[in-house]
Amino acid sequence: MEYKPWKMSIMLLILLQLSVLVSGAPRRCDPGVRGLCKPKVEEKPKCTDVLLSYCDDMSYSQTMFPNTLGHKTREDAEAGAEYLLMSVAESLLGGECNPEIRMLGCSVLVPRCEKDKVQKPCRTTCETVRTRCSHLFEGIEMAWPYFLDCDRFFVSEQEGCYDPLEGLKADQDPEALDSMEFVPPEELATTIQFTYHSNAQMNNILKKTEEQCSDIARTYSIGRSMEGRELLVIEFSNNPGEHELLEPEMKYVGNMHGNEVLGRQLLIYLAQYLCSEYQLGNERIQTLINTTRIHILPSMNPDGYEVAVSGLQDNNYSDDEEQQGYRYDSWNIGRNNAQNIDLNRNFPDLTSIVYNRRRQKGYRTDHIPIPDYYWFGKVAPETYAVMKWIRSIPFVLSANFHSGDLVVSYPYDLSKHPLERNMFSPTPDDKVFKLLSRTYANAHERMANENARCGPSRSHSEKGIVNGAQWSSIAGGMQDFNYLHTNCFEVTVELGCDKFPPEEELFIGWHENSEALITFIEAAHRGIKGIVKDEGGNVIKGAQISVRGIRHDVTTAENGDYWRLLTPGVHIVSASAPGYTRAMKKVHLPARMQTAGRVDFVLQKAALEPDMQEEDVTILSMGTYDRFDPYNQYERYTLMADLSHNREERQEKPWWWSYFVLPGSPSPTWLLKHY
């Protein structure tokens, strides 16, 4: 049979045409073949009714899709995170800047349409609203919404814009609108809002306060928690960042137990109060800040706070008896840090060392070194950070805030009883500690009132104060460590029996404690202060200031200055240092003296005294005072905290984030301020 290729080609062509007809596939457009391609006529968008319920009060009724953001239909716009944000903006922003934010968003989401043409909103209106309202987004750690970008989605009047708020203005008195006052964003940093603050909100408030009062305030970090959260301090001084000669330094520490939250909030409010009152010309606050360096750490345990907040939210779903039982069981949720360490049991137990050595000649109850064996235990990074902080600044006075009772507790915290049973266990400075404790309790609205007592301290406390060991003996407490390791006198303030009081009670808590917080800071100026020098006028660092009858010395700081808290009365005070003779003075402190008495010393060169040598040998047997972290635990803790911090940055989202993550939709990361 003869092979004819042209017949084969014809057959293949017929088969291909048949396959196209059977499959129903359209013929390919070939521009080279006339009539095969028909021009596709796209229907031009036309004006359509505004059917979004949150935009039905705009001054216009027609819009157009696709809109400026690329939503092709009304349904697309309604399903987006942008519209969701507009619908909840009023609740998120506490009712402020509403309906301005919503209407501004509507002008972009459903733009005005006239004669089938879109008109853009005015940039000036957008900028005015942003100036007034951006601080509200910062307050909840939310970025200014991208679709309210004044340069991107709004135009100038020369380009033919319209005012998206004209409908709102038409309903209001024009004169009232022009005269409407709003607080500038820089002033709102110190506007106290009696609500609970997340860790991010707390740090934001502290930094905003620093910005507003930059001449008297400074924030700084002392380290990070186990999960990498910053331990942020704000200080107030007329010369922030520097120790000034003869100016006492004091500190407040809150939220050591993560579930005891009122102290944390009070210290946030105190920072805002100090800033605003200083600027308003409050003479008492100005004097306090000009003569004192005040350090405030609102949260020592931010990780525990996060757990406590989560536990409380889980606890609020039901009020039945079973749920109430769970609430009782969860009373301590969040108390410890992320390692499940109770931070108020984690400091070096120096009190036991004092008790064991009290029968030895020349034993001391001050500047006791941290024993090397302490570092072999589990030291929390929060504890480590606070210890370094305490050692780095010459603090005179301190209070740390707890809840679970209504009382001021003072050292010792550890009982001197052989079996550590609760027992009155005073320090050599018992009179001073009682005076300091009464200073806070008496200035508090209720604490010194016998009828206001609550909690287990009732059987031991007297007019709102109690010895810690007599009430509840503990080892490794922070206030004992302050007293025995440094010059600092610290008390523990229990703010009430409700560890996590309802939000509506925060204002009452501030009202009851605000005067006490200020009065206690003023107590840093009790007693005496001075400078120790040699005959050549050179300052002597580390000289010991002793008071007859009180076996507890304080030492001079880098510049040779010292502060010694004392009760009113007559005291015999001496100064001594290795290689110098002891100098002694008699001091009389009147009962109503408001500032520390100035007592300077000039020491003469001399041979080392035998009793001084004995004391030094005693100290060296436990390791020298400067021997801190001999096994370089800091590097290990820093590494752990940094790893946790990186994990924290990846995982932690603001409290509102879950509202905007929609199934099947991209995550709206444009809402995140630090994304």
Image (cartoon, grey):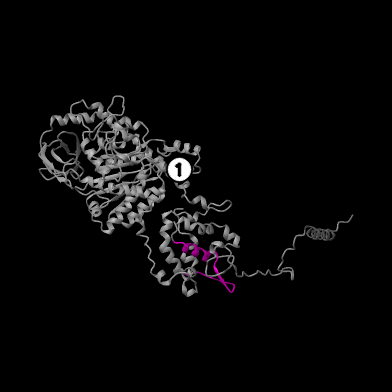
Image point (22%, 27%), residue name:
358
| Image vertical order of residue 456 relative to residue 233, above or below | above
* Boundaries of the magenta span: 97-122
Amino acid of disc 1: Leu
Image check: 504 left or right of 120?
Answer: left
Please give the residue where the numbered disc 1 appears in the rendered image.
312
Q: Position of residue 569 (x, y in %)?
A: 14, 40
Dividing the picture into quadrants, the one containing residue 142 is: bottom left
Q: Hey, which quadrant is residue 215 in on the image?
A: bottom left
Residue 640 image offset from top left, x and y in percent: 41, 40
Q: Is residue 459 above or below residue 653?
A: above
Q: Say if the magenta span includes residue 255.
A: no
Name the residue nearer the viewer: 334 or 609: 334
In magenta stretch: residue 113 = yes
The answer to whether residue 393 of the structure is visible from this angle is no
Q: Residues within 10 Å of mark 1 (few under 14, many from 20)?
A: some
Residue occupying image coordinates x 41% and y 69% = 177
